[in-house]
């Protein structure tokens, strides 16, 4: 006859063998009949969900996660679990590596209830596992995502060069991405791509992007959707037949918010700009450009946008400024080069720099653009309609406004 202690041990073994370990963004809704108390107030906004069936003989468990292939040393996280439900999901917060596979060992201890101390004995089971991509890619795929599902509530997390490149594999399905670190592309020829969806830079920067293209040039060749909270510094981009921008080559139905380009060099046949090369339909809000050199052969170079001449009245550039170093081309403007349809709202440019242009756009200082001496950029009162409490702050060292989102980037 099977002893009660052995029955308890085997029931625990069966629970572990059948379980699937799922990487999740948060604990989600509280599970009925399960109480989890994490030791040392361990905090992480993502972790591991473990489907679990308890033994009918106890409700008292401890779940511990150890880095590596054995339960040795101090666990990364340990939790006391009271499980009165027959089965359910046990969620453990775990700040695992989001840039690649990582091995862990799960140790579960089942303890007899006080009234059964003389009848049942404690049982322990260990189970090793390796984190799997969350983006549907096969294990071992270069740059696969290890956190997120691509939804607006649970974006794919981008935390390395390879993962930034892997965005291209999911770039046309409307997914949402969140960049979690600054990324340096020095030494890599960047292969850009068309993008449809949402990319949130999280207040981080892409540096030293370099690429030469026959189509549209930029971090993104073209963009449909929303781009926000991203900086590009020291980019060097050339295209021989189309448009180029440090961030986006060509935008259609694109909204770009709280982004900047700094010290970038962009050369294109058509429009060349810091934020955007050419628009079909675009809204650019709360963005800036400094220190860039923009050259084009046939149309407009501009600090914020090269060509801003799409045939849609919804086009707008709002609360932006540009301080480029050099503009070279036939239709140049400090804020935007070639200008046609669209509106400009509370945008500013310096009147006393030698960059090759003297007006906001090729068509002159259009409504909504204001020229200021460069020294006046250090006074927030000169920027009408700008939110210096939440969006912008004045950088005394730089003598100009900067974006607050870059002060405290997400998940850095």
Image (cartoon, rainbow, N blue to C red):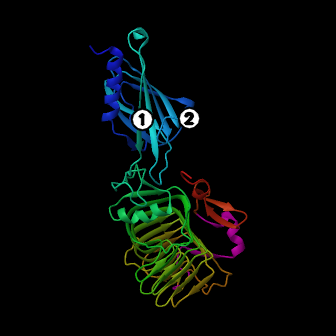
| Quadrant in the rendering for residue 375 | bottom right
State the residue in front, 263 or 75: 75
State the residue in front, 304 or 408: 408
> Dot 2: within a 10 Å radius of its alpha carbon, few (fewer than 14), some, or many (20 or more) residues?
few
Is residue 6 within the magenta segment? no
Q: Nearer the viewer, mark 2 or mark 1?
A: 2
| Location of mark 2 (residue) | 73
Does residue 266 appear to the left or right of 243 in the view shown? Answer: right
Say which residue appears at 43% left-offset and 44% top-offset: 25
Residue 163, above or below 317: above
Residue 319 can be seen, yes or no: no
State the residue in front, 92 or 122: 122
Q: Position of residue 212 (x, y in %)?
A: 47, 81
Image quadrant in which the N terminus is located = top left
Q: Which residues are magenta?
A: 362-384
Ranked by sequence position, the earlier of labels 2 and 1 is 2
Q: Position of residue 211 (x, y in %)?
A: 49, 77
Say which residue appears at 37% left-offset and 75% top-offset: 312
Residue 91: image tag: 1
Kind of element beneath mark 1: strand
2 and 1 marks in contact (CB < 8 Å): no
Kind of element beneath mark 2: loop
């Amino acid at each position: 006859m099977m002893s009660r202690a052995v029955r308890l041990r085997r029931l625990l073994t069966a629970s572990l063998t059948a379980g699937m370990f799922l990487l999740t963004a948060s604990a989600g809704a509280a599970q009925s009949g399960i109480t989890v108390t994490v030791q040392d107030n361990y905090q992480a906004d993502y972790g591991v969900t473990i489907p679990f069936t308890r033994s009918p003989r106890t409700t008292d468990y401890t779940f511990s996660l150890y880095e590596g292939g054995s339960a040795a040393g101090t666990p990364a996280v340990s939790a006391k679990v009271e499980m009165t439900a027959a089965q359910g999901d046990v969620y453990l917060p775990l700040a695992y590596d989001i840039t690649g596979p990582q091995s862990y060992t799960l140790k579960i201890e089942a303890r007899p209830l006080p009234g059964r101390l003389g009848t049942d004995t404690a049982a322990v089971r260990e189970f090793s596992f390796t984190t799997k991509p969350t983006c549907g890619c096969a294990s071992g795929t270069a740059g696969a995502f290890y956190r997120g599902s691509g939804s607006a509530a649970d974006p794919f997390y981008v935390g390395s060069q390879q993962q930034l490149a892997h965005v291209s594999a999911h770039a046309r399905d409307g997914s949402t991405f969140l960049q979690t670190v600054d990324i340096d592309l020095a030494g890599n020829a960047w292969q850009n791509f068309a993008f449809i969806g949402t990319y949130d830079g999280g207040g981080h920067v892409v540096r030293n992007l370099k690429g030469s293209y026959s189509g549209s040039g930029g971090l993104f060749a073209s963009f449909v959707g929303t781009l926000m909270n991203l900086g590009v510094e020291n980019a060097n981009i050339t295209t021989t037949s189309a448009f180029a921008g440090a961030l986006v080559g060509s935008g259609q139905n694109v909204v770009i918010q709280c982004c900047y380009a700094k010290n970038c060099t962009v050369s294109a046949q058509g429009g060349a700009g810091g934020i955007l090369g050419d628009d079909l339909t675009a809204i650019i809000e709360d963005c800036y450009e400094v220190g860039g050199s923009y050259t084009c052969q046939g149309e407009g170079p501009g600090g914020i946008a090269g060509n801003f001449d799409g045939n849609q009245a919804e086009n707008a550039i709002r609360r932006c400024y540009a301080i480029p170093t050099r503009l070279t081309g036939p239709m140049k403007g400090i804020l935007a080069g070639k200008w046609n349809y669209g509106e400009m709202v509370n945008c500013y440019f310096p009147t006393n720099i030698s960059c090759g242009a003297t007006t906001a756009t090729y068509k002159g200082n259009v409504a909504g653009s204001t020229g200021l001496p460069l020294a006046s950029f250090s006074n927030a009162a000169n920027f009408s309609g700008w939110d210096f409490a939440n969006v912008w702050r004045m950088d005394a060292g730089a003598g100009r406004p900067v974006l607050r989102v870059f002060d405290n980037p997400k998940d850095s």
